C-alpha cells in the first residue's frame, strides 16, 4: 500500500515548476493581453507558515488580467484560525461591496481551509472558492516532519507566544466553528474547486477531497501549486466560465 504522503524530496520540484510557468504561455501570454475590465475581484490566502509574499507570482498574474487582488495581510499563517477568519471577514465584505460583485477566494494549503470558512460564513460575498492542496477533511493529515512543526507551534502558543495557534485550537472549543465549516455545504452559487496532487510531499491528497467541491488532480509538489502551469489553466477556465455566466445573466 502506498504511503498517504509522497516522499518529501518531491517538494524540490518547486524550482522546475516555477521555471515552466515563467517559460510557458500561462504568464507570457498575459503580457500581450489587454486587462479585462470585468475581471472578478480576488482574495489570496497563503499556506501554513507562509505569508502573502509566497503568492507574489499568482498575484502578479491576476493583476495582469485586470483582477483587483486583495491579500490576506498575513506575514506568517500560524495564528488561531478563528482569529484570522474574524479579521478576513470584513476585508472580504469590503472588497465585494466596493467592486459590487462576489469575490473569488483562493487559498493554498491551510489558506484553502480558511478560504472555505469564509465561503461558508460569507456566501453573499463569495462567487468562487479555490483550494490548493488544502487538507479540509483532516488538517493533521500531513507528513511527520510537518506534524512535528505543528506540535511545536502549538506548544509555543501554549507558552503565550503571540499570533501562534495553541493546542486549544484543536483540543478545546475555540475553533469548533472553523472545523464545522470544513464539512458544511456551500451555497449553490459558489463554484468550489479543490486541487490536489498524489505526489504532494506535505499533505495526504485524500484529505484534500471535498464532497462539496469539484476535485481536480494535478501532478505538482505541495508548495509548487501556486506556480504550477496546470493550476493556472484551471483558474483561467474558472474565470472564463464566470465571465460567460455574467454575460448570459
Image (spheres, helix red, strand yellow):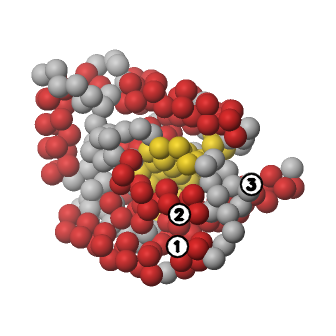
Q: Is residue 39 left or right of residue 174?
A: right
Q: Is residue 186 above or below residue 162?
A: below
| Location of residue 86 with respect to 5 vertically, above or below | above
Give the residue drawn at x 48%, y 47%. Answer: 44
Residue beneath label 3, please?
A: 38
Looking at the image, tell me whether mark 3 or mark 2 is earlier in sequence order.
3
- The numbered mark, 1 or 3, whose residue comes first in the sequence reads 1
Q: Are marks 2 and 1 in contact (CB under 8 Å)?
A: yes
**Disc 1 marks which residue?**
27
Q: In this view of the protein, which residue sits in the foreground, 148 or 28?
A: 28
- What residue do we see at 58% from left, 74% from top? 31
Q: Residues within 10 Å of mark 2 (few under 14, many from 20)?
A: some
Secondary structure beneath disc 2? Answer: helix
Q: Secondary structure at mark 1?
A: helix
User: Would you say residue 61 is visible in this rendering?
Assistant: yes
Label 3 Cα crowd, 10 Å radius (few <14 / some 14-19 / many 20+) = few
Please indicate, yes or no, whether residue 167 appears anywhere in the rendered image.
no
Judge by depth and name the residue closer to the eye, 8 or 115.
115
Which residue does the numbered mark 2 point to in the structure image?
A: 61
Labelled pair 1, 3 in contact (Cβ < 8 Å): no
Placement of 49 over or under 18, stated as above or below: above
* Residue 184 left/right relative to 249: left
The residue drawn where x is 69% and y is 69% is 34
Image position, residue 72 (x, y; %): 45, 40
Q: Viewed as shown, does residue 182 lie left or right of 199?
A: right
Check contact, mark 3 vs mark 2: CB within 8 A.
no
- Front residue (pair 246, 189): 246
Amino acid at each position: 500500500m502506498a504511503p498517504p504522503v509522497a516522499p518529501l524530496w518531491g517538494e524540490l520540484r518547486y524550482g522546475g515548476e516555477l521555471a515552466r510557468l515563467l517559460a510557458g504561455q500561462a504568464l507570457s501570454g498575459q503580457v500581450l493581453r489587454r486587462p479585462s475590465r470585468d475581471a472578478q475581484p480576488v482574495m489570496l490566502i497563503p499556506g501554513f507558515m507562509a505569508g502573502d509574499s509566497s503568492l507574489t507570482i499568482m498575484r502578479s498574474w491576476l493583476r495582469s488580467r485586470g483582477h483587483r487582488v486583495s491579500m490576506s495581510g498575513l506575514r506568517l499563517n500560524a495564528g488561531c484560525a478563528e482569529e484570522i477568519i474574524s479579521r478576513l471577514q470584513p476585508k472580504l465584505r469590503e472588497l465585494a461591496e466596493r467592486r459590487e460583485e462576489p469575490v473569488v477566494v483562493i487559498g493554498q494549503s491551510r489558506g484553502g481551509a480558511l478560504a472555505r470558512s469564509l465561503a461558508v460564513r460569507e456566501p453573499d460575498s463569495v462567487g468562487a472558492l479555490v483550494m490548493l492542496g488544502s487538507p479540509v477533511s483532516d488538517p493533521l493529515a500531513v507528513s511527520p516532519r510537518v506534524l512535528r512543526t505543528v506540535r511545536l507551534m502549538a506548544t509555543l502558543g501554549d507558552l503565550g507566544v503571540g499570533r501562534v495557534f495553541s493546542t486549544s485550537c484543536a483540543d478545546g472549543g475555540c475553533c469548533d466553528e472553523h472545523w464545522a465549516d470544513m464539512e458544511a455545504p456551500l451555497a449553490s452559487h459558489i463554484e468550489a474547486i479543490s486541487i490536489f496532487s498524489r505526489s504532494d510531499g506535505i499533505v495526504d491528497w485524500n484529505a484534500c477531497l471535498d464532497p462539496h467541491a469539484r476535485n481536480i488532480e494535478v501532478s505538482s509538489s505541495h508548495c509548487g501549486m501556486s506556480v504550477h502551469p496546470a493550476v493556472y489553466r484551471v483558474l483561467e477556465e474558472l474565470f472564463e466560465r464566470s465571465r460567460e455566466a455574467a454575460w448570459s445573466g
